[in-house]
Amino acid sequence: MGVSVLIGLILLITVAVAYHKKRMTLKQFLIFELMLLVIIAFPYLLLILMVSNLH
């Protein structure tokens, strides 16, 4: 369940990034990508840490 949601989010973001890339400079695009990566990866990493602590 969680994995399919994550894949869906990644697909959605990829589409959003592809749309924005047309109207952004490379620097803006890279900053945007990094921000998205942090927003997605941070809660996911916290979840992994929580699960690994339970076992």
Image: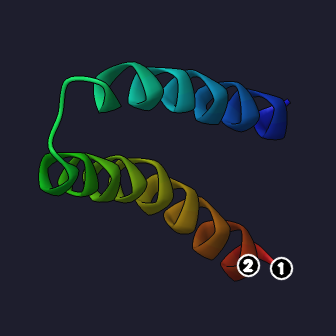
Give the image location of residue 29, x and y in percent.
24, 46
Front in this rendered view, residue 53 or 35: 35
Q: How busy is the neighbourhood of tag 2: few (under 14 within 10 Å), some, or many (20 plus)? A: few
| Label 1 close to label 2 by CB (< 8 Å) | yes
Q: Which image quarter holds the C terminus?
A: bottom right
Q: Which mark is residue 55?
A: 1
Q: Considering the numbered disc 2 on the image, is that residue within a helix, a strand or a loop?
A: helix
**What's the amino acid at mark 2?**
Ser
The correct choice, above or below, for 18 with respect to 47 in the image is above
Q: Nearer the viewer, residue 47 or 14?
A: 14
Q: Residue 36: where, in percent of width, then height?
A: 35, 46
Q: CA distance from mark 1 to mark 2?
A: 6 Å
17 sits to left or right of 15: left
Q: Nearer the viewer, residue 38 or 28?
A: 28
Instruction: Establish if 17 lies above or below 3.
Output: above
Query: In the rendered picture of this protein, how many numbered marks are placed on residues?
Result: 2
Q: Which residue is mark 2?
A: 52
- Which residue is depicted at the point 70% across and 25% down? 8
Tag of residue 44 = none
- Assign a secondary structure to mark 1: loop
Q: Amino acid at mark 1?
A: His
The N terminus, quarter of image: top right
In this rendered view, identify the residue nearer to me: 9 or 43.
9
* Residue located at (41% from left, 31% from top): 17
Q: Nearer the viewer, mark 1 or mark 2?
A: 2
**Badge 1: residue crowd in 10 Å (few <14, some 14–19, many ≥20):** few
Say how the picture is coloured.
rainbow
The correct choice, above or below, for 50 with respect to 31 in the image is: below
Q: Is residue 18 left or right of residue 26?
A: right
Q: Residue at x 46, y 54 (%)?
A: 43
**Residue 32 location (% of width, % of height):** 24, 46
